[in-house]
Image (cartoon, grey):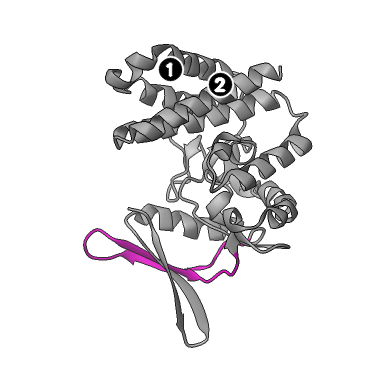
């Protein structure tokens, strides 16, 4: 279920009560506060636990501001350098206390994969389970997407670094001149930091297109000379698309799966045209 949030006040404190179904995600929010709270505006986690009917709760400090996707275009332009600067502060010495790659377990501080490449190839394993009733009419497009993605994996480094996993859009709160909160650390793990910041996959989706495009363009300016930058950014965009298609097919959301496939093909075309 989608997490629901409520503002609550009592005494001299104002907090945010979130109700969801995944206790592990709230545990990771608490881990993130401990790990990054000195360098990033991560809300204080006061309490979290289980409720009846398989629900869970998390009570945190309240953070003012609006999500990036709700800012005006002018506010996004002024905020984007701040978002980029915050992204650079994800890399701390705490990486030395972790192991593996991929989604980080907040108890063991380990990721389930032995390399970043193995994590990326996991999307291919899921894609091979796509129903043939969907893939066969689109066999040429599906084959191109998966073959190109597999090739691009080799351009990505196997270095270990922290990633938020769902950076930007509705998980960062801010005003026109400062960031007030970095939220939702459920997908945090170990990988290539470019996964968080260089992607343009969601630029086709109106609610987030302005902030996604602004951040990706800023990343291009600041990081474009990194080794295999364009290939890595495209690889992570295709990873997002493949993951979304997998989820859509599982949920029988066939129209959106089609849109995600088309978006991946558009990104491949743009990449080839600019080569």
- The residue singled out by tag 1 in the image is 142
Q: Is residue 178 above or below residue 222?
A: below
> What is the C-alpha distance between the residues marked 2 and 1?
17 Å
Residue 267 horizontal/vertical position (percent): 58, 25
Q: Earlier in the sequence, mark 2 or mark 1?
A: 1
Dividing the picture into quadrants, the one containing residue 122 is top left
Q: Position of residue 156 (x, y in %)?
A: 61, 25
- Which residue is the extreme one toward the left? 53
Q: Is residue 73 visible?
A: yes
Q: In the displayed structure, does residue 216 sit left or right of residue 52?
A: right
Residue highlighted by disc 2: 153
- Asked if one can make out residue 157 in the rendered structure from this viewpoint, the answer is no
Residue numbers of the magenta segment? 41-65
Q: Which image quadrant for residue 271? A: top right
Left or right: 136, with 70 as reference point = left
Q: Which disc is residue 74 wearing?
A: none
Q: Nearer the viewer, residue 268 or 39?
A: 268
- Quadrant in which the C terminus is drawn: top right
Residue occupying the point 35% across, 56% down: 23
5 vs 36, nearest the viewer: 5
């Amino acid at each position: 279920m989608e997490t629901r949030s409520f503002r609550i006040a009592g005494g001299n404190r104002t907090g945010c009560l979130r109700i969801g179904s995944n206790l592990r995600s709230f545990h990771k929010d608490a881990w993130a506060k401990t790990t990054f709270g000195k360098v990033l505006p991560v809300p204080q986690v006061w309490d979290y636990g289980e409720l009846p009917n398989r629900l869970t709760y998390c009570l945190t400090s309240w953070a003012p501001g609006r999500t990036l996707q709700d800012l005006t275009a002018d506010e996004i332009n002024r905020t984007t350098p701040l978002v980029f600067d915050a992204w650079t502060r994800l890399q701390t010495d705490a990486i030395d206390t972790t192991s593996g790659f991929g989604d980080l377990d907040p108890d063991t501080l380990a990721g389930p994969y032995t390399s970043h490449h193995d994590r990326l190839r996991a999307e291919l394993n899921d894609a091979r389970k796509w129903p043939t009733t969907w893939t066969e009419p689109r066999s040429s497009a599906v084959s191109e997407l998966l073959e190109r993605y597999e090739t691009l994996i080799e351009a990505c480094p196997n270095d270990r670094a922290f990633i938020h996993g769902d950076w930007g859009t509705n998980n960062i709160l801010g005003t026109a001149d400062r960031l007030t909160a970095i939220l939702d650390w459920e997908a945090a793990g170990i990988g290539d930091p470019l996964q968080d910041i260089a992607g343009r996959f969601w630029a086709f989706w109106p609610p987030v297109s302005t902030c996604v495009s602004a951040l990706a363009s800023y990343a291009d300016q600041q990081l474009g000379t990194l080794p295999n930058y364009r290939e890595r950014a495209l690889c992570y965009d295709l990873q997002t698309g493949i993951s979304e298609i997998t989820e859509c097919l599982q949920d029988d959301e066939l129209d959106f799966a089609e849109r995600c496939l088309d978006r991946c093909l558009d990104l491949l075309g743009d990449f080839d045209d600019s080569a």
